[in-house]
Amino acid sequence: MKFKKGDTIVVTIGKDKGRKGKIEKVFPDSASIKVVGINVSKRHMKKRDEKNPGGIVDIIKPIDVSKVAIVCPACGKPTRIGIIVSKNEKTRVCRKCGKKV
């Protein structure tokens, strides 16, 4: 998977289209990522005890990687990521400007 924790992404499809954020967690098995403030849904929680008072709670749900694009730190544009293999090392590069991501 070409996405890593800490990468800046922009949403290309869906209700949060155009919003930017940093990747909080990556789920490679389901090809999805969790981003702070993106794909937030509401859940009605029942009161459990004093620590969990209940009510309407915001939950951040994972978003599929096909709906996001990485923002290149060098050129600042949403782009795809290429991988260059040299001997024992893999480096991620921007497809638009060619610089290291």
Image (spheres, grey):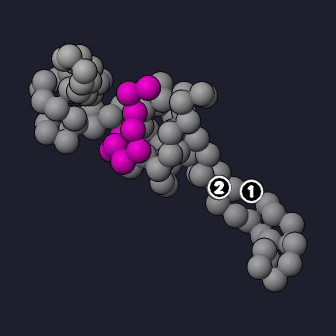
Identify the residue at horizontal 36%, vertical 31% (top origin): 69
- The percent position of residue 77, horizontal first and vertical second, equals 21, 35
Q: What whole-number distance in Å separates the C-alpha atoms at marks 2 and 1?
A: 7 Å
- The percent position of residue 33, horizontal first and vertical second, equals 51, 39
Q: Amino acid at mark 1?
A: Arg
Left or right relative to 4: residue 52? right
Q: As displayed, is residue 80 above or below residue 18?
A: above
From the viewer's side, name the closer residue of 14 and 9: 9
Q: Can the viewer see residue 20 in this picture?
A: no
Left or right relative to 40: residue 94? left
Chief SS of the magenta region? loop
| Element type at mark 1 | strand
Quadrant where the C terminus sits is: top left
Q: Amino acid at mark 2?
A: Ile
Quadrant where the N terminus sits is: top left
Identify the residue at horizontal 74%, vertical 65% (top origin): 56
From the viewer's side, name the closer residue of 23 and 13: 23
The residue positioned farthest toward the front in the image shown: 88
**Residue 59, numbered circle:** 2
- The percent position of residue 36, horizontal first and vertical second, equals 48, 54
Magenta residues, start to end: 1-10
From the viewer's side, name the closer residue of 41 and 33: 33
Identify the residue at horizontal 70%, vertical 64% (top origin): 57
Q: Is residue 9 magenta?
A: yes
Q: Can the viewer see residue 11 in this picture?
A: yes
Left or right relative to 8: residue 24? right
Q: Which picture quadrant has residue 73? A: top left
Residue holding disc 1: 43
Q: Residues within 10 Å of mark 1 (few under 14, many from 20)?
A: few
Q: As displayed, is residue 100 above or below residue 6?
A: above
Q: Earlier in the sequence, mark 2 or mark 1?
A: 1
